[in-house]
Image (cartoon, rainbow, N blue to C red):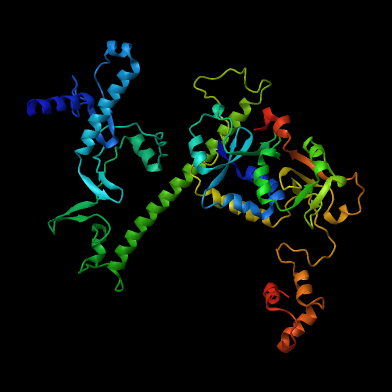
Amino acid sequence: MRPLTEDESKAVFTKLANYIGKNLVHLIDRPDDPHCFRLQKDRVYYMSEANMRMSISVARPNLVSVGTCLGKFSKSGVFKLHITALDILAQYAKYKVWVKANGEMPYLYGNHVVKAHLGRITEDTPEHQGVVIYSMSDVPLGFGVTARSTVDTRKLDPTAIIVFHQADVGEYLRDEDTLF
Amino acid sequence: MDLSAVVAQQTAAQAAKYKSVAVEKEIPLEADVGLLTIIDPNPIDAEAYQADREVHLQALARDGVQALLAQVFALPTKSSIHGPLAILPQPTTKLPRAKPLPKPRMLTKWEKFANAKGISHRKRINKVWDEEKKEWVARWGYRGKNKEAEQQWLHEIPANKPADYDPRAEARKARKERKDKNELAKQKNLEYNARMQAKRDVIDRSVARSRMSTASMGKFDKTLEGEKKPRGVKRKFAPNEASSTEKERSMALISKLDGKPVSKKARIDPRPNPGRTEDVLNVRKAVKFASRGAGSLALGRSLEKPKKRTMSKTSRKKMGGRH
């Protein structure tokens, strides 16, 4: 376990900022309960400093997971967010998409969000913007990237993709063994 | 029943319940209270150890801690907000140093010469005996012996010197020259050593590169005697725990990211839309609402003439002077 280098931090922060924008500051600046980002093997974890101090004494091969796993670095140095980061993203999300009840299951099986399943969307969402996807009862289901801006979605046909799927809570079952 | 018998019985029961505070050992325990350490040099009782290891070890540990605490409680104390604190003495145990020994300094030109000639260095103290004053005076510095010639109250002028000869200035000049010469020599030594080190580094690097430049990348090459294994560059990471600066670094990184678009792919609608801002307040809508659809110009006019104002107090507050 070690702190991120500057390049790694940059990769993580840009990825997070795509979803939560300037709210990223609230993840780092938490005066009541200071938190930090740590890299263990290729995964990035977000944990309280108290937890970090305790986990220092655990040997690297024995440390399976600590805090919240945000995602992993691929071999080529690209940072990929995991569904485990959803809690944090949903808390601070800037742009949101709500899917209708009939669209929940298709989305949770890993499909994109189509126009027919779109319940609501944040006004002024730009194209290719990271969004968090909620059910109509405001339960976060996953996150993705918008295919069109809010304005452009109005003229699309019902089968057109609105949000590209990136991660959904179904992965907790599907990718259980590699997720954390 | 006799009272003394009852008391004796009770104290016996107490003694059985609580072990003695005094620790008795064949070889007395060695303590280093400064490091809060106690060492038990007694050999382990094999029978007791075999019978029940945990109990035996716990008993040993208990005795050690008891003896240590007894010594700590005998120490002088000072009061603090957390209660009395014992003042620990200096540790007596010598611990090995944590860091490796510093590398030997490169020799100066004089040191090399002195070594070659067998001149041994002797420590020169900054005190010299003054025969006239009958006391020890500083060799240099305040009232130093080296300034004696320029600070004396009466100067002798040699007969062959011109009339404007200033012995005070001459002596001072000579002293300053000696100092400058030494400074120059020091500078030259530093430069020379840096140059030599750089040369050595270049050689080391090229040797390392040439050793890796064979078909097997140096794996099956014969090594010379005393040749060390080539070392790669070690990666360095920030310490895990000393995270006082970590937050500042992260914040600086975020503020650097702030100027650029969040994602390279995220496209903001290029169509002119004055209402699209990062703020919570949609200025265009607020103006429209406050002026009841008349626009900002009408709103400005109405503000100039307070009699005719059409908007409520709350809506003016919302505006916040942004129009």
Q: Is residue B153 found left or right of B297 in the rendered image?
A: left
- Where's residue A22, x and y in %? 66, 55
Q: Is residue A48 above or below residue B230?
A: below
Look at the image and tell me in which quarter the N terminus of chain B lies: top left
* Image mark count: 0
Name the quarter where the C terminus of chain B is drawn. bottom right
Query: Is residue B29 positioned above or below B52 on the image?
Result: below
| Residue in the image at 80% along x and 57% along y | B268
State the image coordinates of residue A121 (x, y, percent, origin top left): 79, 52
On the rendered structure, is B8 left or right of A138?
Answer: left
At 39% across and 56% down in the image, what residue appears?
Answer: B180
Above-or-below relation of A25 to B148: above
Residue A83 location, x and y as percent? Answer: 70, 38
Q: Position of residue A77 (x, y in %)?
A: 69, 38
Q: Is residue A82 visible?
A: no
**B247 up-or-down from B94: above or below:** below
Quarter of the image where one finds residue B160: bottom left
Residue at the image point whose x is 79% and y is 67% from the top? B274
Q: Residue furthest front?
A: B1
Q: Is residue A175 visible?
A: yes
From the viewer's side, name the closer residue of B83 and B120: B83
Q: Nearer the viewer, residue B151 or B73?
A: B73
